[in-house]
Amino acid sequence: MFSRILIANRGEIALRIIRTCKRMGIETVVVYSQADKDAVYLKMADRAICIGPPQAKLSYLNINNIIAAAEIADVDAIHPGYGFLSENAHFAEVCRSCKITFIGPPTKAIEDLGDKISAKAIAKKAGVPTVPGSEGEMADVDAALKIAEKIGYPVLLKAAAGGGGRGMRVSHNPISLRANFQQAKTEAEAAFGDGTVYLEKFIESMRHIEIQYLGDEHGTALHLGERDCTVQRRNQKLIEESPSPAIDKRTRYDIQMAGVRLMKEAGYSNAGTCEFIYDLKERKYYFIEVNTRLQVEHPVTEMVTGLDLVEEQLRVASGEKLRWRQKDIDRRLAAGGHSFECRINAEEPKRSFAPAPGKISLYCPPAGSDIRMDTHIYSGYSVPPYYDSMVGKLIVHGSDRLDAVRRMRNALDELVLEGIPTTLSFLKEVFGHAKFVAGAYDTSFVTSEMGL
């Protein structure tokens, strides 16, 4: 096992990784930008090294500075967390060339699965259903129009690189497709440095379901159940839960095993997530992409399985065999109850979820059995304007879905976070909404039911 690792990230995920490392007796080194000089996790790590000014491209995305910090601190490995460089194949390769273990999948798997067109080809090879659409990059808008005519409108333009809803455009007719084609390419180029887009049939009533995967370097491949991430705004997740209330036992098994087949086909090890959409009308599922890293929503999986996914990542990256078999996980899932995660964002929901950085005047977390608050904030903390607006994650666990809904309602009522606008009131409204409580909604919920 590693003796010392560097955490190439910030915020709650940095603190979350530190906690697991402390329990395992592993020393931690954190890097930070000047904007994060007052972060509480700097005091909890064994060492903290400043790597640059507030702008992410000069600090958390600065590979040279991060590697220099790792060499100065003489670490065995680097954990990238999520976001920033976590899915950057070049960074993973630089780590390995410097004899530093990258805590994540092999470089080739990041490259192959990081491109959505390549990932779709791997899925097809593994016999996993994919959304009807283009086989790869489209040469021009005329090619897109021909494919759209064949598969039928509406259609969805998607960036081949990146995620987070950027480079995505829905078109309901040829006129809108012509207008959206160049916009999607321009946005993809600006966001990811790659203007490649492809086209898929747009499923109008769907759930977003993902499979948590775990594999080692000795051939063992497992799924850890599914998460339902259907409550979204602008294709970005707001609430996640496990298991999904939208699928039956047979569909659950099929999706879970499809995720395992795909990841094995890609030669994947460590933790990763296969994402699918589930067509509520046709009752069919389709692969959409792979996240080659730990997910923001991994705590709901931890709640229903009892596993520490960061610990499993560390063990796999150090060369150990997985300690679990699929039947072990299946037993845990069968008795695992239900879990929800709410992302607490410094945003104004009624202003299109506009970011709202500023100083937190008062913070008091909820407490009690089966309640978990993953955050790095404190009373007096100033949320910087340079990074993602998420300031914490509230996770609950219940014996079943309705019990978990009640627990989340109580936890949201107990959580005190004052001084800045947040999504707390929005989340309370969602957990009081009849359709959400019944589990009868799709990805349009925030727009169609909440009017946001």
Image (spheres, grey):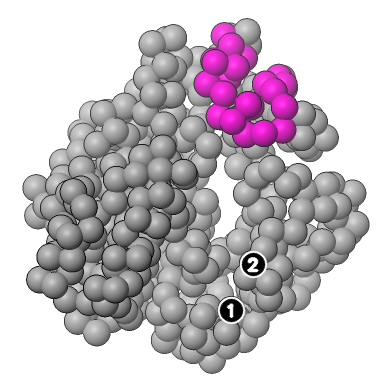
Camera-side residue: 277 or 379? Answer: 277
Q: Does dot 1 land on a helix, a strand or a loop?
A: loop
Q: Say whether marks 1 and 2 touch (CB < 8 Å).
A: yes
Asked if 311 appears above or below 445 in the picture, the reply is above
Residue type marked 1: Leu
**What mark, if any, has residue 353 been given in the picture?**
2
Residue tagged 1: 452
Residue 200 falls left or right of residue 182: left
Number of marks? 2
Q: Hey, which residue is sitting farthest bottom in the picture?
A: 434
Res 50 quadrant in image: top right
Q: Is residue 444 magenta?
A: no
Asked if 347 appears above or below 173 in the picture, the reply is above
Q: Position of residue 344 (x, y in %)?
A: 66, 61
Question: Looking at the figure, which quarter contains the C terminus?
Answer: bottom right
Residue type marked 2: Phe
